[in-house]
Image (cartoon, grey):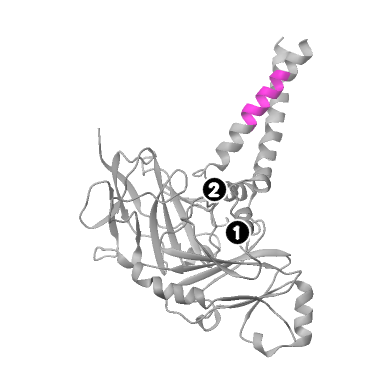
Amino acid sequence: MRLITNVIIVVAIGLVLGGASAWYSIRQNHGLGGIEAGPWTAWPFAGGADSDPYTTAKVSRDGTIPLGATEGLAFEAMTDNQGEPLTFKCDYAISGITPPSKLWTIAVYSNDGQVVQPTKGNRSALSSSKLLRFPDGSFRISVSRKPQSGNWLSVSGEGNFYFVLRVYDTPVTSTSGQVNPQMPNIIRQDCAA
Amino acid sequence: MKWRVFYLLSLGLILAGLIHISIVLLIPKLGTRDAWAFLSNRTDLFAFTRLKPEESGSAITEVDPFFTYGVCRFELSEAPLKMEGPLTTTFWSASVFDENGSVIYSLNNRTAIDNKLDLLIVNPLQTLELQEAQPEDVESSVVIEAGIERGFVIIRVLEPDNSWVTDSDAFFSEIKCARYDYS
């Protein structure tokens, strides 16, 4: 009797801790195998043949097609600069600069990996080619359910979302030692009650 | 009693470690949302297929809305793959994947020879055959020697807005993905 209890306790500890830690370590915004810049995380080796098992598991679980090193690099942000999860209840401002690249795009995704539906006639994704910039080359993008002046990412929905900023044809991936990429800040603005 | 708790806890932790490692290692093998399992059911060998990620039931997530995608699946044990595309002004990039979804080679229109998509993917044995045959039609090709049997090439083409759809349609319609014959 005592043996059975012992076995049950050991198996329970193993399953709960092992399962939870495995799930946690391949969750989208966990930094294992990634490089971080503020709220952004990128997996520069997601596509590589020598990618680590955590990154491989993450790519497989997410069902994404990773970008090759010559193609570009995808940065994900699931939180704002304060570390708070991104929610549709709040407006956000994305401002700053991006790593040097030929072009970049930013899109809003819901947690199932699909692009968030914008309000009718608008876009929930922006590309660098159609961006309004300040004279110094930096930019500010408003993320809101209501129309905004300037660059506006239109979103609608419930719950949480995340951003993916992809830089294409960028020296960031080819520079040895992975220079710290400069990424824009994500600052929370007004929130609906 | 104290020792029993300690003993059980450490056994549990060891088991947890084993389970953790096996889950992480098994997910790519057993994953049902795997993009690669999805692709091989939907596409033919040596045929260029446009991907429609917006289709329902697609396992491919996190697609860039500014890009359109196409895939070419190959099996080197059958024949080498020759891939060609026309000259275009839009940004495009291509990645060669093995069947586990690892990128073994990637290029974009700036790094390609004459900005043209022209790839020849061979396995080590075919490299030798190629050196012997020295065919002229692959002189301008990027030759990729890959120690794999099966894989995919994914082409991404930038489509900044709807007015570019005709351009990328034309580009995609001219992409060739075919078995290569030395003789």
Give left or right: position of B19 versus A63: right
Q: Amino acid at mark 2?
A: Asp
**Residue at the limit of the structure toward the left, as seen here:** A149
Which of the 4 image quarters holds residue A136?
A: bottom left
- Label 2 Cα crowd, 10 Å radius (few <14 / some 14-19 / many 20+): many
**Residue at the limit of the structure toward the bottom, as seen here:** B136
Pointer 2 residue: A62
Point out residue A161 in the picture as x, y percentages from the top left corner.
40, 44
Pointer 1 residue: B42
Residue A57 falls inside the magenta stretch: no
Point out residue A14 in the picture as x, y percentages from the top left corner.
68, 27
Give left or right: position of B30 versus B108: right
Q: Are marks 1 and 2 in contact (CB under 8 Å)?
A: no
Q: Amino acid at mark 1?
A: Arg
Q: Is B1 rendered above or below residue B118? A: above
Mark 2, secondary structure of its residue: helix
Protein chain holding label 2? A
Q: Main secondary structure of the magenta part?
A: helix
- Label 1 Cα crowd, 10 Å radius (few <14 / some 14-19 / many 20+): few
